[in-house]
Image (cartoon, helix red, strand yellow):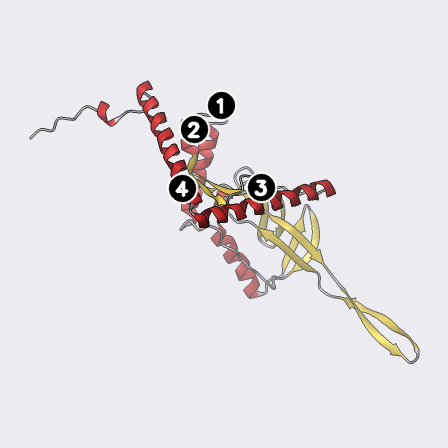
């Protein structure tokens, strides 16, 4: 569905393509001349209007069915040539504009649009394959998830500290869910947040003291040994249940001489 255009730049939202804008703002100012008068208030005179200023943001992604290279080249050409562009949004004509400033930020580059488009198509095919399921299985996760990166806690030693986790999906890379705008905190919530930060700082100072004394290194060593023993026990149980095929159960393959 076409929702508008800026010259030959079409804003379109459909099942196969999403190419539209966000944060569009149109601003304008008036021109006033000042006339000083002796021992009297200054008089102002309306002399006209300045040109309206239009700003907006566009996300160009091959995953959305758009060729970013072509669209950026088109906008750059309009800026360099000074072409006048008619702005229409939702059937309303907002006037004629020229591009005075154009900035771009490259977040991900796939080498070519075709490569990114193919990978996006493969991911959509994968999603369509699992549109109706009742149980999330390990094979399904393996098909969707490429890797998961767990970063260090923001505050060392604090068990309630925030911690960044990256989920990289097959074909499309890191998944970044939309984040809602934070709601204003009540006085009670602000006080609770202050106590949480105070407690985290206390935990961090205790961690630094343990690290300096060597107690933290000893704790880390014992913890790693426990984790290693727990993994070994789980693996042994899986081998016993026949879930994991051990090396000792693989028959040698005869090789002809």
Q: Residues within 10 Å of mark 1 (few under 14, many from 20)?
A: few
In which quadrant will I find the N terminus?
top right
Q: Nearer the viewer, residue 245 or 38?
A: 245
Cα distance between the residues tagged 1 and 3: 24 Å
Question: Badge 4 is on which residue?
Answer: 218
Q: Are marks 1 and 3 in contact (CB under 8 Å)?
A: no
Which residue of the protein is positioned furthest toward the right in this rendering? 39
Q: Which type of secondary structure does the marked residue at label 3 adopt?
A: loop
Cα distance between the residues tagged 2 and 4: 40 Å
Cα distance between the residues tagged 3 and 2: 23 Å
Residue lying at 23% horizontally and 23% vertically, measured from the top left: 249
Residue 158, image x, y percentages: 54, 42
Closer to the chain start, of discs 2 and 4, is 2
Question: Badge 3 is on which residue?
Answer: 178
Cα distance between the residues tagged 4 and 1: 47 Å
Q: Which type of secondary structure does the marked residue at label 2 adopt?
A: helix
């Amino acid at each position: 569905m076409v929702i508008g255009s800026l010259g030959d730049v079409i804003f379109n939202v459909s099942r196969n393509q999403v190419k539209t804008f966000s944060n569009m703002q149109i601003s304008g100012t008036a021109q006033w001349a000042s006339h000083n008068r002796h021992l009297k208030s200054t008089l102002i005179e309306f002399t006209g209007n300045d040109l309206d200023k239009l700003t907006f943001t566009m996300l160009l992604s091959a995953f959305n069915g758009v060729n970013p290279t072509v669209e950026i080249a088109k906008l750059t050409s309009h800026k360099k040539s000074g072409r006048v562009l008619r702005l229409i949004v939702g059937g309303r004509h907002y006037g004629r504009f020229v591009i005075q400033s154009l900035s771009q930020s490259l977040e991900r580059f796939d080498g070519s649009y075709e490569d990114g488009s193919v990978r996006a198509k493969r991911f959509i095919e994968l999603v369509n394959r699992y549109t109706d399921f009742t149980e999330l299985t390990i094979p399904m996760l393996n098909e969707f998830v490429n890797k998961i990166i767990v970063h260090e806690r923001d505050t060392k030693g604090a068990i309630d500290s925030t911690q960044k986790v990256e989920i990289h999906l097959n074909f499309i890379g890191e998944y970044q869910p939309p984040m809602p705008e934070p709601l204003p905190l009540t006085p009670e919530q602000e006080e609770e947040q202050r106590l949480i930060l105070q407690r985290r700082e206390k935990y961090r100072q205790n961690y630094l003291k343990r690290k300096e004394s060597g107690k933290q290194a000893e704790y880390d060593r014992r913890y790693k040994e426990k984790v290693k023993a727990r993994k070994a026990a789980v693996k042994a149980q899986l081998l016993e249940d026949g879930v994991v095929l051990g090396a000792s159960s693989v028959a040698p393959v005869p090789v002809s001489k």
